[in-house]
Image (cartoon, rainbow, N blue to C red):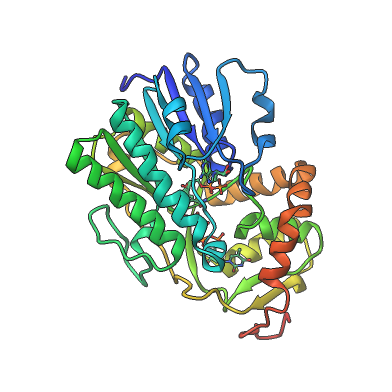
């Protein structure tokens, strides 16, 4: 049932969620062909798609979503576009906002123009709960106002607003998904969960911003992929669909669970200077996507165990990432980042 999906474009398909989505699609849409368009930035990794290298249904194109000629070439003949390509890390966007503006805003505009020009039947913008901003209690619905707080989320909000403007102006057949924090296999070790799992495995410090009380709602990447696929198949054009994890935890809770699961020394925990403008809490309601038939399958407990096992079994994958450009990034981001807070009993 639902929408035709013979030829599917997945931008950002060599990244974390994008590569999980490619695996999901090739399982769930066995007759479809999938084209991945990815610039292979520091976050893109062809190793993520390596097990599929002999699958004739998958084609990989290296290119920039902000380049109109490349985009027109790959988009022609597609039934649907899923736009995962983005600069996705808040801390890097705070260091330098150039690339988030380029990819998350300009790239979205170039894709939308190509969808319009070539009359592509369907476009899904993969976005984030961060666009709503932070709230201390309660949760956002899709009709709430956007109040992004950092360059990353501001540019994701700009991308979303462009999509909705094209829907209204040109009746572009586009939809938006906004999910909470993802975790799972193939996530780049710059993000909280994989950074802490891999640092724990290397007996390195576990940096906790501020006092660790900030709250995120954790969603297993496979559940997000199923929901995004469903929205592409059955969602209503012009609509926004939140995808929640229903697993709100403080960062300190997550770190302590990782300490237990990896059996590392709890004294590795380090409270470090907070992220500037650090959003305290994200929370969304997702009745609309559930009304399409979506149900999450992963509990946070099972998901974290599976994720720790995956990183244990794929040490070469993350060691190669951590040994490259990431080593310089890590030094710049974390070295000399003194604590503002220390835990009673002291883990400094
Ligand atoms: P990621 O950083 O792991 O992957 C991004 C991918 O996009 C990489 O493969 C990169 O090479 C590619 N890319 C970057 N700029 C490009 C460009 N100009 N042209 C083509 N390709 C480009 O990101 P992710 O965590 O997989 O996030 C995927 C999407 O989901 C993003 O749009 C992000 O905003 C959104 N999202 C992520 C989360 C999360 O928790 N990770 C939560 C909600 C929404
Ligand atoms: O070393 C760290 N220590 C720490 O305390 C890192 C990397 C993070 N944190 C905190 C900051 C956040 O409160 O952990 C929380 C999660 O941080 P990130 O993994 O950087 O994610 P976040 O900033 O919440 O943004 C993520 O979720 C929404 C994704 O990176 C975005 O792409 C997505 O849109």
Question: At x 60% / y 15%, what residue is drawn?
Answer: 56
Q: Is residue 49 above or below residue 167?
A: above
Nearest the eye: 194 or 66? 66
Q: Is residue 34 left or right of residue 140?
A: right
Total numbered labels = 0
Residue 324 drawn at (x, y percent): 76, 52
Residue 311 drawn at (x, y percent): 72, 46
**Image quadrant of residue 170?**
top left
Residue 247 appears anywhere in the view: no
Nearest the eye: 86 or 217? 86
Residue 59 appears anywhere in the view: yes
- Quarter of the C terminus within the rendering: bottom right
Residue 258 drawn at (x, y percent): 67, 59
**Image quadrant of residue 190?**
bottom right
Q: Is residue 187 left or right of residue 173?
A: right
Question: At x 57% / y 40%, what residue is drawn?
Answer: 39
Question: At x 18% / y 43%, what residue is drawn?
Answer: 168
Nearest the eye: 325 or 137? 325
Q: Is residue 46 left or right of residue 34?
A: right
Q: Is residue 215 left or right of residue 199?
A: left
Question: At x 76% / y 46%, what residue is drawn?
Answer: 312
- Quarter of the N terminus within the rendering: top left
Residue 113 drawn at (x, y percent): 32, 37
Nearest the eye: 136 or 107? 107
Q: Is residue 310 above or below residue 281?
A: above
């Amino acid at each position: 049932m639902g929408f035709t999906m013979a030829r599917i474009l997945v931008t950002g398909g060599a990244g974390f969620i994008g590569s999980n989505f490619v695996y999901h699609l090739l399982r769930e849409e066995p007759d479809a062909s999938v084209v991945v368009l990815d610039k292979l930035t520091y976050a893109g990794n062809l190793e993520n798609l390596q097990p599929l290298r002999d699958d004739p249904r998958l084609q990989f194109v290296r290119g920039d979503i902000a380049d109109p000629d490349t985009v027109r070439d790959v988009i022609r003949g597609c039934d649907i576009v899923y736009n995962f390509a983005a600069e996705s890390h808040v801390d890097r966007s705070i260091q330098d906002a150039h690339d988030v503006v380029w990819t998350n805003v300009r790239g979205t505009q170039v894709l939308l123009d190509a969808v319009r020009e070539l009359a592509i039947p369907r476009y899904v913008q993969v976005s984030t709960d961060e666009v709503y901003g932070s709230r201390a209690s309660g949760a956002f619905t899709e009709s709430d106002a956007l109040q992004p707080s950092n360059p990353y989320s501001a540019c994701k909000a700009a991308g979303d607003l462009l999509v909705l403007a094209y829907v209204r102006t040109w009746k572009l057949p586009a939809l938006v998904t906004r999910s909470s924090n993802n975790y799972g296999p193939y996530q780049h070790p710059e993000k909280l969960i994989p950074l802490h799992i891999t640092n724990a495995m290397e007996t390195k410090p576990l940096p906790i911003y501020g006092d660790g009380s900030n709250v995120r709602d954790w969603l297993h990447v496979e559940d997000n992929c199923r929901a995004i696929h469903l929205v592409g198949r059955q969602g209503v054009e012009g609509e926004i669909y939140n995808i929640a994890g229903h697993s709100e935890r403080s960062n300190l809770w997550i770190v302590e669970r990782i300490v237990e699961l990896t059996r590392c020394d709890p004294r590795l925990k380090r409270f470090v200077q907070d992220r500037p403008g650090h959003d305290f809490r994200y929370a969304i309601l997702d009745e609309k996507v559930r009304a399409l038939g979506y149900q999450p399958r992963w509990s946070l407990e099972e998901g974290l165990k599976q994720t720790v096992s995956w990183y244990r079994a794929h040490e070469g994958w993350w060691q190669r990432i951590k040994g490259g450009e990431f080593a310089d990034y890590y030094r710049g981001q974390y070295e000399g980042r003194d604590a503002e807070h220390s835990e009673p009993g002291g883990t400094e």
